[in-house]
Image (cartoon, rainbow, N blue to C red):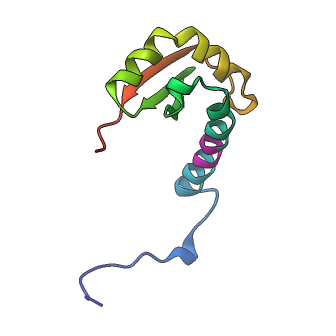
Amino acid sequence: MCPYKPTTNISNFSPNGDLGQLFAQAKIYNEINAQLTPKLPETLKTLELCLIKDGAATLIASNPAIASRAKQQTHELLTLLQSVSLAGKIDRINIKVSIKQ
């Protein structure tokens, strides 16, 4: 082990801290994605919820073609997201394209 690389001491982890809140938020988003995916049309199955902030849900598309289809169906996607119990109050949708290759 290199003496210059600090190690993280996870014994100090607090579920009430910032990291704990991120884990809780990630669990909620994963649950929303699990409920949303079966409801999506076949052409939009790769959409994933990334963020909910200030009433706006951000969905990530795997490529520009899917993002374009999703932008044409924002009203239907909004209705589907509002039907998911954990999604809370969502009044608009943003579609982004993933840059991962």
Can you give x and y, in whole percent of width and height, for residue 95 in the image? 43, 22
Can you give x and y, in whole percent of width and height, for residue 60 in the image? 44, 31
User: Residue most toward the front?
Assistant: 42
Residue 29: quarter of image: top right
At x 32%, y 24%, the residue is 64
Can you give x and y, in whole percent of width and height, for residue 86 in the image? 72, 33
Location of the C terminus by quadrant is top left
At x 48%, y 28%, the residue is 59
Side of 49 relative to 87 (left or right): left
The stretch in magenta equals 26-30
User: Residue most toward the right?
Assistant: 85
Is 36 magenta? The answer is no
At x 58%, y 53%, the residue is 23
Q: How many marks?
A: 0
Q: Could you tell me what secondary structure mostly forms the magenta stretch?
A: helix
Is 27 magenta? The answer is yes
Which is nearer the eye, 89 or 60?
Answer: 60
Q: Does 51 sit above or below residue 15? A: above
Which is nearer the eye, 95 or 27?
Answer: 95
Residue 11: quarter of image: bottom right
Side of 34 relative to 100 (left or right): right
Location of the N terminus by quadrant is bottom left
Side of 9 relative to 4 (left or right): right
